[in-house]
Amino acid sequence: MSGAPLLIAIDEVQSVKGKGRDDRLKTLLKGVQHAGGVGVMWPVGLVMTGTPDAYGHVRACGTFAERMIGVAPFDKSNIPLGSLNEQATAQAIAEPLSEHGITVDDDVLDMAWQETMGHAYFVQAFGKSLCESLQENAPGSQSVGMDIAEAALTNFNGMKRQRYEERRMELQATGSLEAALLVAQCIFEKGPITSDHNSMLCATPEWGCAKQPTGRSGRTGANGPIQERTPSPPCCMPA
């Protein structure tokens, strides 16, 4: 049994339920695994994107998921996606509009970079705000200048505030807000995370550092009891 090649793409995969009754992700992964099984050999590709915790979310669906993405060559397909650079940001704003015969001033593209710093979500939001501003303030215009961009900023900044508020509420709900603010402060100040910072980070269970055993004894060697130590998580390492 075989079929035409199929590529499945899923965005925000960390939001797809993988356990319980509504285990859509687990069902999908099992289907992909079966499609490539002996006697089937249906060429199916699966591309999943999401937040940094998406990798662990997928692996938690079961041992079969670990085999799919946790061993070679699948482990090499876990590709970190960072921010766009300045050139890619300009292309993301200008090229979709150019398909409709609309040009974007260089000053506007500079603004797009300064306002988004290449963050994919904010680049998309900035482009959306530009299009809405163009339609509202200069319908039929074939160019986007600073007047259109300035008018778009109000809507764009509102979208940014909403995004930040959603993330803040998520962090607050998990008790991770204080630790996240600390990390953000260290990044903003470009300073090292000190041992005092580590203590605060490790007080947050969601960071995987709380109540970690520092050692245990029980075995006896030639010179007395042997103290065995469990390696500490990365964020609890001494500064």
Image (cartoon, helix red, strand yellow):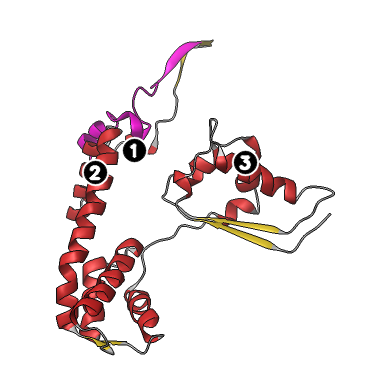
Residue 157 at what x, y percent from top left? Answer: 18, 62
Placement of 144 over or under 229, stated as above or below: below
Placement of 189 over or under 176, stated as above or below: below
Q: Nearer the viewer, mark 2 or mark 3?
A: 3
Q: Magenta segment range? A: 192-218
- Visible residue check, residue 128: yes
Q: Of residues 31 and 37, which is closer to you in this image? A: 31
Read off the residue under disc 1. 235
Give residue 62's quadrant in the image: top right
Read off the residue under disc 3. 27
Which residue type does callout 2 highlight?
Arg
Which residue type does callout 1 highlight?
Cys
- Residue 209 highlighted magenta (yes or no): yes
The structure residue drawn at horizontal position 22% and vertical position 80%, both measured from the top left corner, is 108
Read off the residue under disc 2. 168
The structure residue drawn at horizontal position 57% and vertical position 37%, both measured from the top left corner, is 61
- Residue 185 highlighted magenta (yes or no): no
- CA neighbours of label 2 inside 10 A, class few (<14), some (14 to 19), many (20+): some
> Which one is earlier in the sequence, the residue at label 3 or at label 1?
3
